[in-house]
Image (cartoon, grey):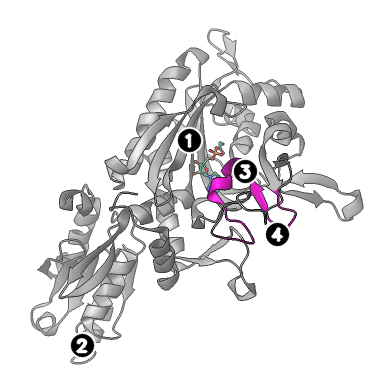
Amino acid sequence: MPADVVTMDKIVSLCKRRGFVFQSSEIYGGIGSSYDYGHYGVLLKSNIKGQWWRAMLQERDDIVALDSAIIQHPTTWKASGHLAGFTDPLVDCRTCKLRFRADKLEDARCGRKPSKHPGETPDCDLTDARDFNLMFETTVGAVKEEGSTVYLRPETAQGIFLNFKHYLQFSRKRPPFGIAQIGKSFRNEITPGNFIFRTREFEQMEMEYFVAPEEARRWFDHWLEQRRDWYLRLGIRPDHLRLRAHDRDELSHYSSATSDIEYLFPIGWQELEGIANRGDFDLTQHAEYSGQKLEYVDSATGQRYVPYVIEPAAGADRAMLAFLVDAYDEDEIEGETRTVLRLHPQLAPVKVAVLPLVRKDGQPELAREVHRRLRERLQTEYDEGGAIGRRYRRQDEIGTPWAVTIDHQSLQDQTVTLRDRDTLTQSRVSIDELEDELDRRLRAPWCSPKLSAA
Ligand code: GAP
């Protein structure tokens, strides 16, 4: 792994120490591949989702939003092909009773001899591989035995196809147009435990873009470029991001072409987001199973067709991991190692910390007043506990781009120092100009300081 890629252990440790992400159900020993998001994790993920909505809805006028139910009619998954085909090949070990993905044995550890992969030692007694469906099954209805089997959605996309007709009728949309949704998806993943990279419940950010069939290729290229640019604009280093086209034998059952945007995670190059040309597969299948017409009819020309679908499908949790990995840095200040998250200011959980230099002489009172003014516009934090250096370090670790310090001079001339997380420069700014100055900095184009340091 290149030296500029942080280890997963450092990310997990920072996330726990600073309250971004915790192992779920930790007091009961934890539950595999499930994580809880703490205060800063919630803020960071919410900013990532906010930027995605912004790119989909605010910066364009051809995409509309949806929030569909997690539990859909069970026929959805017959029509979509998930009941028959959404499987992983799994093997069980008769000795240690653990279950592994047959195609990822090299990523897993033997239950008896963790220094070995499953199958590498006589301690392992592996069954043949069998296909297991990844969907979680449950029952709806008052009486379990009489209820019907339903599934927790394994992707948000199907909710979009089920609502396609509404958008044609009520939003008067005509191709090319997109429907975007962010929501939880669920998969019974058997994972080697790579933190929030692959979990059993996760949030997807998916958009289905409906186009005339002959225009599908052009829009596929368009979305590849748009989505790659989104990560770059939010500060991901270009040499840690790449596009990879799927080989024919890798394609999902619905896809005629897919390219992944891959990121150089601590576990190597891995999918961050997939962009697929789903053709007319989904609308045709749902039309057949529902008996409804799911097609576009041009009222002027009478032309009718089933639109093709281009789908950029991202994971909010996986994106958060990529942004954390890309931002993590260590440098040295006054002989001490500083951990700093060099996050894009738009993504940073807290934009500005307000700190009185000392807890006396009227400084806390003025600092609280400044804090009150700033929080009207920005996510801020007030902190008066401990030495100023330690308070800066705490903010650096959660990626706060700016700190405002109220000192002795502030009480005399109504100015404060404004410290920059990355350059460590401190400039003197009048309290009256602070909001505009922060606003200006927040809107300015940003690129990772790790790039200029390289
Ligand atoms: N609708 C297409 C679809 O769901 P996918 O490649 O299976 O495609 C899209 O998922 C994105 O969702 C992935 O690129 C990844 O970012 C995220 N994702 C998928 N499974 C995940 C899991 N188990 N844990 C976290 N994120 C996941």
Q: Residue furthest front?
A: 122
Is residue 61 positioned above or below 10 on the image? above
* Between 303 and 300, the one nearer to me in the picture: 303
Give the residue type that dot 2 points to.
Val
* Between 127 and 291, the one nearer to me in the picture: 127
Q: Earlier in the sequence, mark 3 or mark 4?
A: 3
Q: Position of residue 384 (x, y in %)?
A: 28, 83
Is residue 256 positioned above or below 349 on the image? above
Instruction: State yes or no: residue 355 in magenta.
Output: no
- Identify the residue position indicated by label 3 in the image: 68
Question: Which mark lies nearer to you, 2 or 3?
Answer: 2
The numbered disc on residue 358 is 2
Instruction: Choose top left, top right, bottom left or bottom right for residue 76.
Output: top right
Q: Earlier in the sequence, mark 3 or mark 1?
A: 3
Instruction: State yes or no: residue 97 in magenta.
Output: yes
Q: Earlier in the sequence, mark 2 or mark 3?
A: 3
Residue 188 visible in the shown view: no
Q: CA distance from mark 3 to mark 4?
A: 41 Å
Q: Is mark 3 within 8 Å of ligand 1?
A: no
Give the residue type that dot 4 points to.
Cys
- Identify the residue position indicated by label 1 in the image: 274
Q: Earlier in the sequence, mark 1 or mark 4?
A: 4
Q: Which residues are magenta?
A: 92-114
Mark 3, residues whose alpha carbon is within 10 Å: few (<14), some, or many (≥20)? some
